[in-house]
Amino acid sequence: MSNPQSTEDDLLIAGEPRESMRILPAFVQPYLTWVTGVPLKGGKQLIPWSPAKAGLLGIVQMAVGIALGAYALHPLTAWSPFLLVLGWLLTSGGMRRLDVVVVHQTLHRMFTKKAWSNRLVGELITTVFWRTPYDENRKEHLTHHAFPCSMKDGDTRYLLSTGMRPGMTRTEFRRYLWATLFSPRHHARFLFGRVKSNYVGVRPRYRLAMSLAYLTATVAFVGLTGWWVEWLVLWLVPASVFFQSCTYLYTMTEHRWWLFGNQERLPRDKRDLLTFGRFCGEAVPDASLSGGRRAAAWATWTFRMLVVHSSYRMFVLVGDTVQHDLHHVMPACDWANSPWIRADDQGNRPERYSEVWGSLADHLQAAGQVEGDRAGLPEDVAPTPWTESVPVVTGAVTPDGRTVKGQL
């Protein structure tokens, strides 16, 4: 006689990748919660996080990356290229934590309790990383929250300028993605814009003074130590090409940018669908497998969790950004503990959340509607055709994705 409860449990495990991992030992569950971004139902949080810990983790990751790069350079060995690339990724990942997690929360005045200290932290980090000064950054970000994925949103215009459009075939999308990631023009424009924002037309004046002081200190330090090569290799490379590549990939997956044609005004239910939980991972292998097939399936699953998904979380989808939909639903929440906050709120308001499981590739395809990808969307949602979207209708972008000069 079958057990109804067993059937119900089997369906639950089959439908939710994180719950399928419940069969694994308890000591690996904290890691699985981190990499997936989802705690087990009824699970307990071992380490309560705070804004300070989140910031410290970014600094430590960046320091480890620089130290690893320095070790790779002195002396040069056969392992140096591999260690150097790993160091660049760690350094840029640490920078991303400080930028997209810490600075982001200072813009919402949610990193510290005082407005002035949020400004101080934000200005210091953006000065060091050549990012947009606090006031302009905050203005742009609040506009993003008010008009997400619209033509008023700077991130929308940025992605359109790279040639992005929805409905590409997988081949077209891969070609576009690799061309942008390795485009000298894209990286030069990105870096030039960052540097310009720190030295041209900067307001308030103290921010320009900070940028000039940082430039002077950098030149003096490098000149006195003679570490020009070290600065270029260990700092400038990860702060430019790697940081910008990770920022581009993160931005691409941040929203379903093209779902409703970049309209400015949307009802709440449609606005909620613009953002989704970017959960990393996949269900454990089927229990019915045996022998060599079972061993191969578990080896593949382990490799993907430890290498594919963990790399994504370390270098691109850092910190609380997995639960970015929570941020748009509850900007003032306890963001440092967002996996548990989102799980609780989803239980109370499931209609406000959607999610896509998988890897960076899955999130890119879902966000970009590659070949009409509808992962995580309700069946009754009708995406706005690209030809009827605001950028195409207004003539800012041609139907094939090319931008019209002076229109963005």
Image: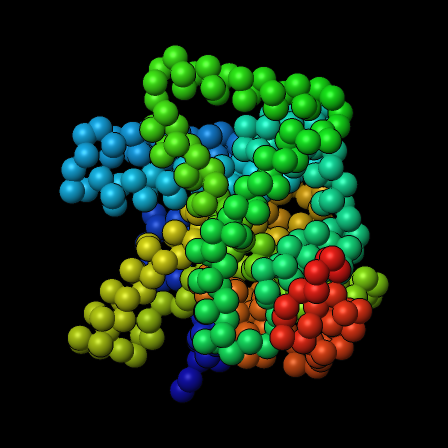
For the view shown, which residue lies furthest in the front direction?
A: 405
Q: Is residue 73 above or below residue 392?
A: above
Q: Position of residue 141 (x, y in %)?
A: 72, 45
- Please name whichever residue, 356 or 122, is drawn nearer the observer in this view of the structure: 122
Q: Is residue 84 left or right of residue 98?
A: left
Q: Is residue 59 above or below residue 169?
A: above
Q: Position of residue 349 (x, y in %)?
A: 71, 61
- Please name whichever residue, 117 or 185, is drawn nearer the observer in this view of the structure: 185
Residue at the image point whose x is 24% and y is 34% from the top? 72
Residue at the image point whose x is 74% and y is 72% from the top? 392
For the view shown, which residue lies furthest in the top direction?
A: 224
| Residue 111 seen in the figure | no
Residue at the image point whose x is 67% and y is 64% from the top? 403
- Please name whichever residue, 288 or 212, is drawn nearer the observer in this view of the structure: 212
Colour mode of the rendering? rainbow
Residue at the image point whose x is 77% and y is 69% from the top? 395
Q: Position of residue 131 (x, y in %)?
A: 60, 36
**Quarter holding residue 208:** top right
| Residue 187 seen in the figure | yes
User: Quarter holding the C terminus?
Assistant: bottom right
**Quarter holding residue 102:** top right
- Please name whichever residue, 387 or 10, is drawn nearer the observer in this view of the structure: 387
